[in-house]
Image: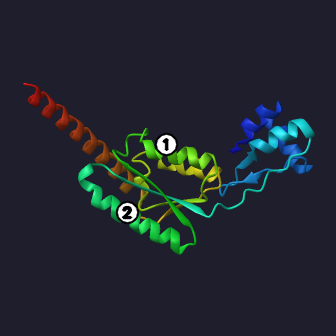
Amino acid sequence: MWVSISLAARICEVCSKTLRRWEIREIICPSRTPGGHRRYSLDALIEFLDSGIYQPISTESTGIAAIYGRVSASKQKKDLQTQILALSQQAQADGFTPRKYTDIGSGLNDKRPRFLRLLIDAINGRFDRIYITYRDRLARFGTHSYEEIFRTLHIPVIIIREVSDSTLETRLVNDVIALITSFAGKLHRSRRGKIAGK
């Protein structure tokens, strides 16, 4: 597991400036995210506290790629199968063995069982990369936060059908539509339940 400089400083009981000085003196040399943020190996930090030597363990490739598919309702199972087939083919074409994770449920629900399993397996280093069809398959909101988590873990997220017109305005409109659709669906189910209960 990889941690930020602030968390690494707390673990070592020093300030962030000390870690930066140690980096210059090559006592502890962190990895960097694509955005340039420092990341420290938690295991190597713990070992450093005992031995004074910071040596991140080189993680070997698992050769496995997570493929994550999601649809909102059971009646969309055919679409889910189509997603998984396309993702599997892409992973195999890239030389990876696909590991399937699928959910049927709203992208607004952050407690989807297979999505949570995907996060846990990512933290435990059980695959090298993640394939999804569209960004909103991960979640309707907060996708960039999840992508940052995966980036910190050095796990790239491959989106095989990225929407080209992904401007800020388009994303905001899609977010509002997703909220209204979700709210309308819940309201409809609630009313249907009340009618059935009469």
The quarter in which the N terminus is drawn is top right
At 42% across and 45% down in the image, what residue appears?
Answer: 141
Q: Is residue 178 or residue 107 the one in the foreground?
A: 107
First of labels 1, 2 by sequence position? 2
Mark 1 vs mark 2, CA separation in Å: 19 Å
At 66% across and 58% down in the image, what residue appears?
Answer: 34
Which numbered tag is attached to residue 12? none
Q: For the residue marked with disc 1, what is the amino acid?
A: Leu
At 51% across and 50% down in the image, what residue appears?
Answer: 144
Vertical position of residue 100 compared to residue 19: above or below: below
Q: Residue furthest bottom?
A: 93
Q: Is residue 190 left or right of residue 39?
A: left
Q: Position of residue 36 (x, y in %)?
A: 70, 54
Q: In the rendered image, is residue 10 in sight?
A: yes
Q: Position of residue 30 (x, y in %)?
A: 79, 50
Q: Position of residue 51 (x, y in %)?
A: 92, 40
Q: Position of residue 114 (x, y in %)?
A: 45, 46
Vertical position of residue 84 compared to residue 185: above or below: below
Q: SS of the residue at dot 1?
A: helix
> Circle 2 sits on which residue?
83
> Circle 1 sits on which residue?
116
The quarter in which the C terminus is drawn is top left
Q: What is the number of callouts on the image?
A: 2
Q: In the rendered image, is residue 163 in sight?
A: no
Q: Residue furthest left?
A: 198
- Using a 10 Å C-alpha cutoff, classify the residue at mark 1 as few (fewer than 14 neighbours), some (14 to 19) or many (20 or more): few
Q: For the residue marked with disc 2, what is the amino acid?
A: Gln
At 19% across and 36% down in the image, what residue appears?
Answer: 189
- Asked whether disc 1 touches disc 2, contact meaning CB atoms under 8 Å apart, the reply is no
Vertical position of residue 21 compared to residue 95: above or below: above
Q: Is residue 33 left or right of residue 159?
A: right
Quarter-wise, where is residue 154 in the image? bottom right
